Amino acid sequence: MPDLYKLLAGAPTVGERISRLLQFRQMTLGDLNRASGVAKGYLSELVNEAEETGKRKPSAETLYAIGEALGVSVADLLGRTRPIDEMTDWPAGLADYVRAHNVPPEEARMLAGISA
């Protein structure tokens, strides 16, 4: 997986982020429908919605299902992806753990997003 931050940077909507991830993974909306269980029509509406009219607000459950199918977190779909080198505001010790155990960037971001 490329650096998610670079892949998703500048994507203004959830639909645009999904579109970029689909393109990267060489998946179709049908593939995502089958993998996530989210209706293909709804996925199409999300992906094709313009920034100005971005009124669709997928539920947390829907975002989770899409994220699982695409191998990303809900935070990534919501545009909260952070550069992996931006570890200064992570919980104490997490950056050290990530470096020491070679935790993949996607998992490190997920860990950083967990709050007690």
Image (spheres, rainbow, N blue to C red):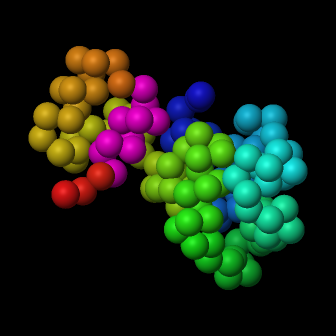
Q: Residue placed at 51% from the left, 42% from the top?
A: 5
Position of 79 with respect to 97 (left or right) is: right
Percent from the top left, x then y, of residue 81? 46, 49
Magenta region, mostly helix, strand or loop? Answer: helix
Position of 91 with respect to 42 (left or right) is: left
Percent from the top left, x then y, of residue 94? 21, 35
Tell me, yes or no, if residue 92 can be seen here: yes
Percent from the top left, x then y, of residue 2? 59, 29
Percent from the top left, x then y, of residue 97? 21, 26
- Is 72 colored magenta in this rendering? no
Q: Quadrant of residue 102?
A: top left
Q: Residue placed at 59% from the left, 47% from the top?
A: 68
Q: Residue placed at 38% from the left, 41% from the top?
A: 109
Position of 71 with respect to 87 (left or right) is: right
Q: Is residue 116 above or below residue 108?
A: below
Quarter containing the N terminus: top right
Q: Residue placed at 66% from the left, 45% from the top?
A: 69
**Total of numbered circles in the picture?**
0
- Is 109 colored magenta in this rendering? yes
Q: Is residue 35 above or below residue 13?
A: above
Quarter containing the C terminus: bottom left
Q: Nearer the viewer, residue 91 or 12?
A: 91
Tell me, yes or no, if residue 12 can be seen here: no
Q: Is residue 41 above or below residue 37?
A: below
Q: Quadrant of residue 33?
A: bottom right
Magenta region: 104-113
